[in-house]
Every structure is written in structure tokens, then in C-alpha cells.
Amino acid sequence: KKELLTKGKEIIEREVQLFVLEEEIQKVKQQEAKLLEKLKQKKKSHKGSNSSTSHEEVGSLNLDEYYQPTPRRIVREPKVIESRIDLPSFHGKEDVDAYLDWEMKVEQIFTCHKVWEERKVPLTTLAFQGQAMYWWTTLVRERQLHNDPPIEYWNDLRSAMRRRHIPSYYSRELMDKLQRLQQKNMSVEEYRQKMELYLMRAGIREEERLPIARFLSGINFDIRDRVELLPYRDLDDLVQLCIRVEQQNLRKIYFKKDKTHSSSYVKKDYKREDQFSKYDSSKNFAKV
């Protein structure tokens, strides 16, 4: 009995599916007939056209267009065209500060122009001249002889150049300069720039209170004694206060010099007048 029931259900489901399919086929035929009628009307309105196609072909084409899925929109990314990049030339002289300035400038240009990693080494080596060009040629030949991989990335080239141009004792010497740094005859702004340069070259990153203490320890006493009594928020605020005190001190010195100069000038004039009066009195006495 169960088998008969399942078979009966299957037969009923098949009949329902056939019925649904027949309805869909009729709907498609109706749509096709409507499309054919529209095409006939268009042909009548455009009698002057020379194109002639059969109703079946046109109907099938229009049906294909009717059931065609919507095309996907292809978004084409614009091609990135790199502009011409001219790096500053490098001659390979034994000057650590000059090399570090050149390296910093090159990295700024790479960041600004968004240079690809594959182009950095060729662009950099094109900027080599003189001793630097000879060193690079020798390095490439030595790596080929020893079957070492070529230098293809900027970090590897920078490491090789630093081994060449920066001595091993440079960081220790830089720290000594930083510890002994004093303002002396420099202006406040010059002193601050030199301190920041040493910190950057040494790769030191300190908390905000440490650079302030370092700055105050090396500034001149006449400025520090007055600034320590004033409130400030950070290093920039402290530097501005020091500059104001420095300008006040310069004005005082200039005022004192101007005052001494004017007083000396008055004394000279007084001496001259005294001499002239004595000379006139001697003349009058001779006449008498």
C-alpha cells in the first residue's frame, strides 16, 4: 500500500509539473506573438527601409534580447603614469652629514612621487657620480663573482651605503656631542635646531619632558634663570619664551651701547668747547 501511495504521489507531482510547464510555454508564445505584431507595425511605418528579414528570425532575435541578462559594468582602473624624477647627485665624498642629508632628501622624493620599490634602486644608482659611481660598479661586480643576489631594494642599498659612508663610532660620537651641547654664542633657535638634528641623527625618541630638560641644561644662564620662573606647556612654548628673553637682553645691550656712545660723544664736545674757550681767553689776554 505504501508503494502504491508513493507512486501515486509521484504521478500527481509529474502532472502538476507538466501543467506548469505548459502554462509557461503558452506565456512565452503569447509574448512572442506580441513582439511579432510590434515588428509588423514598425515595418509598415518604415516602408522605405531596404532591410528584409523573416518574422521567425526577427522574433527569435528579439526574444534573445528580451531574455538577455544585463551586462556587468566593467570599471577600468586608470593607468598610473609616473612622472620624471630627478634625484640629487651623489659624489660619494667622505662626509657623514652630507650623506645623511642626501639620503633624507631621496626618501622625501620617493614618498612624494610614490615611487615603486622596483624603481628605487635604478633611480638612485643613476644619481651616482664620481667616486660613488666607481664604488657601485665595483660592488655589483664583486656580488656577481661571489654569486650573491643583486641589490634590488632600497633598504638593502641604503644599508650598503651606510656601511660605506658612516663609521662605526659615529653614533657614539654623536651622543657625546649631544651631551656636551651648549648654547654659548648661538641664538636660541640655532641651539634648538642643532639639538633636534643630533637627536634625529642618533635615532633617539624621548618623552616630552626629557627634551625640555635637555634644552634647559644647555641654554645660557641669563635666559634660563628668567625662563624657569615662567609657565610653559611644551618644548615649543619654552623655546618661544627663551626667544623673547633673548630679544629683551639684546635690546638692553644695544641700549647700553647707545647710551655709552652718546655720553662719550657729549664728553668730547665738552672738551672741544673748553679748549676753544681757553684759546679765546688767551687771545684776549695777549691783546690786552
Image (spheres, rainbow, N blue to C red):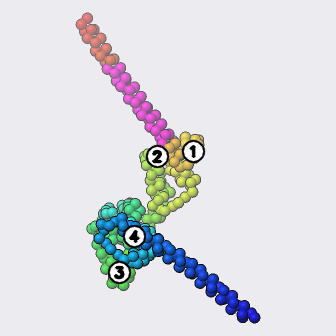
Spatial separation of the CA atoms under disc 4 and disc 3? 80 Å
The kind of secondary structure element at disc 2 is helix
x and y percentages locating residue 183 in the rendered image? 46, 49
User: Magenta region's main secondary structure?
Assistant: helix
Question: Which residue appears at 75% of the width and 94% of the height?
Answer: 1
Q: Earlier in the sequence, mark 2 or mark 4?
A: 4
Name, please, the residue furthest toward the top. Answer: 288
Say above or below: 256 vs 188: above
Residue 157 visible somewhere in the drawing:
no
x and y percentages locating residue 13 in the rendered image? 65, 85
Span of residues in magenta: 243-272
Label 4 belongs to which residue? 40
Label 1 belongs to which residue? 232
Amino acid tagged 2 = Val
Label 3 belongs to which residue? 143
Amino acid tagged 4 = Lys
